[in-house]
Image (tube, grey):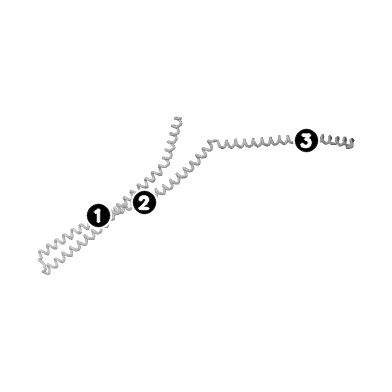
Amino acid sequence: MSILKRLFKIGESEAHSAIDKLEDPIKLTEQGIRDLKKDLEKSMQALAEVKAMSIRTRGEIKQARDRAEDYEKKAVMILQKAQSGGIDAAEADRLAGEALGKKEENVSQASQSAKDLESHEKSVAQLEMNVKKIRLNISKWDNELKTLTARVKVSSATKNLNKQLAQIDSTNTVSMLEKMKEKVAQDEALAESYGEMAHESRSLDEEIDNALGDDAAAKSDSLAELKKKMGM
């Protein structure tokens, strides 16, 4: 008995292993989709952050250019004031030089920010491509998962049907039906035989009764003649 139990356990284990192998593609696809969705979330977050940097950099460029333009205007105004005698010429030259220095700093800052903006925009374009690609893969894998799930259902149903058909063959159901047909035919023949025997028995009884019926008529005639002679 223990050997049979062990064999049954081995067969049961192999069956579970086969089922697990069948379900693995679905589980792997589901896990792959979950991983892609995590990647999409990270890429979307990175895209939002880089876009925010681009927006901030554009603002910094505008501000730096506006400041550069403002410092240049101030330098011109200082020189004009010195020319009209409103300020010492030497002091005006110093302040105008300082203003132009500030202008150059902002021009340089605007130029560097413009380079940063170009880099940010390249990153934005790359991230947008990644996001698009991940979304396409998620959609593709979702469709594959639906197809795979449907195939598993069909194969499972087919397997169960074939298993039932195999079990029917293994129990010799067809042979049993043939034996039942043979038994019914034998019973029908036996019933017909008994019917013929009963008919033969009834026929014999009728012959006997008929024979006895003739003797009884003869006896009745003899009795009537005797009574006539006796005056009865």
Q: Position of residue 231 (x, y in %)?
A: 89, 37
The amino acid pointed to by label 3 is: Asp
Q: Residue at x 53, y 36 (%)?
A: 171
In front: label 2 or label 3: 3
Left or right: residue 67 versus residue 42 is: left
Q: Nearer the viewer, residue 23 or 89?
A: 23
> Toward which corner of the image does residue 199 lie, by quadrant?
top right
Q: Secondary structure at mark 3?
A: helix
State which tag comes first along the sequence, 1 or 3.
1
Q: Residues within 10 Å of mark 1 (few under 14, many from 20)?
A: some
The secondary structure type at the circle numbered 2 is helix
Q: CA distance from mark 2 to mark 1?
A: 28 Å
Residue 50, horizontal then vertical, whole percent: 28, 54
Q: Bin the neighbour count of mark 2 within 10 Å (Cα to Cα): few under 14, some 14-19, many 20 and up.
A: some
Q: Secondary structure at mark 1?
A: helix
Q: Kindly indicate whether the residue at mark 3 contacts the one at mark 1 (C-beta within 8 angstroms).
A: no
Disc on res. 135? 2
In the image, is 107 to the left or to the right of 155? Answer: left
Count residues near mark 3 (Cα–Cα under 10 Å), then give few for <14, some for 14-19, many for 20+. few
Q: Nearer the viewer, residue 144 or 65?
A: 144
| Circle nearer the N terminus (2, 1) | 1
Give how far apart the Cα atoms at labels 1 and 3 are. 133 Å
Residue at the bottom extreme, as displayed: 84
Q: Given the image, on which type of amino acid does mark 1 rest?
A: Asp
Q: Which residue is mark 3?
A: 209
Image point 62% across, 35% down: which residue? 183
Evaluate if marks 2 and 3 touch, with contact meaning CB atoms under 8 Å apart: no
**Residue where numbered disc 1 is placed:** 116
